[in-house]
Image: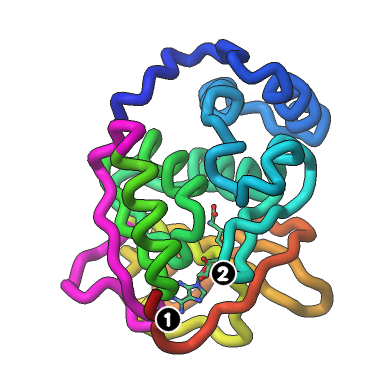
């Protein structure tokens, strides 16, 4: 758990946050602690300054380096699936980006492992979350397709960039009954949630969503 003071209450220091929360509720997001958390995280601090006036809008926004933060509904839906289906022990996130999703994961999971291939995004997210007092996150600057470098079994894996094929390293590190959340692009772009059941995958939900592509290798600076 982070030191970030949430206490299950939306304090609405940012007035636009209440509109975002209302909209999320209308779209079927019901988890009170998640809604409160999203209402309290200063989303404008995670997007490019030129877009901060749109920070609470229902749209993906630039975070630098041609990457985007997902729109609030997508973040909320992915997190609600995790809260409903996953054991909240260890989670691996591929695509730290701005660190917004990481910040939410850190609130609910005991430990978050997050990987980003773009060096400046990795450094900024790390600094931003440290500044918020979040301590249960391990950050890695690497190509996330190779998975976490040490063999650690994960309760959940969440991939926040679109791949045509899921790297084996990311499914192999999942415990049996672990939860996988990843975007898929056919027949239309969407995000899906699966449970690993032996060598089978049970689909637990999916929803339309757009994502930037999962890329190869690392990008310095
Ligand atoms: N969850 C993020 C949104 C991330 S956008 C947020 O809340 O802001 C997707 C991110 O995945 C981008 O930052 C991109 O650089 C990163 N990414 C793409 N391919 C990757 C890879 N192979 N390994 C690690 N990160 C990757």
Residue sitting at 62 percent across and 54 percent down? 69
Q: Which residue is mark 2?
A: 65
Q: Nearer the viewer, residue 167 or 65?
A: 65
Please identify the quarter of the rendering in which residue 20 is found.
top right
Task: Tell me, yes or no, whether the highlighted magenta stretch contains residue 115.
Answer: no
**Ligand 1 closer than 8 Å to label 2 CB:** yes
Residue bounds of the magenta highlight? 131-154
Quadrant of the frame with the N terminus: top left
Please identify the quarter of the rendering in which residue 191 is found.
bottom right
Q: Point out residue 144 in the picture as x, y percentages from the top left corner.
A: 39, 76
Coloration mode: rainbow
> Gap between marks 1 and 2, in whole Å?
10 Å
Residue sitting at 29 percent across and 59 percent down? 139
**Residue 157 visible to the viewer:** no
Q: Earlier in the sequence, mark 1 or mark 2?
A: 2
**Ligand 1 closer than 8 Å to label 1 CB:** yes
Q: Point out residue 19 in the picture as x, y percentages from the top left corner.
A: 77, 23
Using a 10 Å C-alpha cutoff, classify the residue at mark 1 as few (fewer than 14 neighbours), some (14 to 19) or many (20 or more).
Answer: some
Task: Tell me, yes or no, whether the highlighted magenta stretch contains residue 146.
Answer: yes
Q: Which residue is mark 1?
A: 219
Label 1 element class? loop
Q: How many marks?
A: 2
Task: Identify whether 5 is placed above or below 194.
Answer: above
- Evaluate if marks 1 and 2 touch, with contact meaning CB atoms under 8 Å apart: yes
Q: Nearer the viewer, residue 38 or 79?
A: 38
Using a 10 Å C-alpha cutoff, classify the residue at mark 2 as few (fewer than 14 neighbours), some (14 to 19) or many (20 or more).
Answer: some
Please identify the quarter of the rendering in which residue 53 is found.
top right
Relative to 105, is 165 on the left or the right? right
Relative to 202, is 187 on the left or the right? right
Relative to 139, is 201 on the left or the right? right
Q: Nearer the viewer, residue 102 or 30?
A: 102
Label 2 element class? loop
């Amino acid at each position: 758990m982070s030191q970030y003071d949430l206490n299950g209450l939306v304090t609405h220091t940012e007035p636009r946050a209440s509109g975002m929360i209302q909209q999320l509720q209308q779209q079927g997001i019901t988890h009170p602690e998640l809604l409160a958390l999203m209402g309290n995280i200063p989303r404008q601090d995670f997007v490019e300054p030129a877009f901060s006036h749109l920070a609470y809008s229902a749209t993906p926004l630039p975070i630098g380096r041609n990457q985007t933060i997902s729109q609030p509904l997508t973040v909320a839906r992915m997190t609600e699936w995790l809260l409903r289906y996953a054991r909240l022990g260890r989670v691996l996130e591929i695509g730290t980006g701005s660190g917004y999703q990481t910040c939410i994961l850190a609130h609910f999971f005991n430990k978050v492992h997050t990987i980003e291939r773009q060096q400046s995004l990795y450094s900024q997210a790390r600094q931003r979350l440290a500044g918020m007092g979040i301590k249960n996150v391990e950050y890695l600057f690497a190509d996330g397709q190779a998975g976490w470098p040490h063999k650690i079994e994960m309760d959940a894996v969440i991939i926040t960039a679109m791949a045509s094929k899921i790297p084996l390293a990311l499914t192999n590190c999942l415990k049996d009954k672990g939860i996988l959340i990843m975007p898929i692009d056919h027949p239309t772009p969407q995000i899906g949630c699966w449970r690993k059941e032996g060598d089978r995958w049970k689909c637990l939900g999916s929803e339309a969503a757009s994502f930037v592509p999962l890329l190869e290798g690392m990008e310095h600076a």
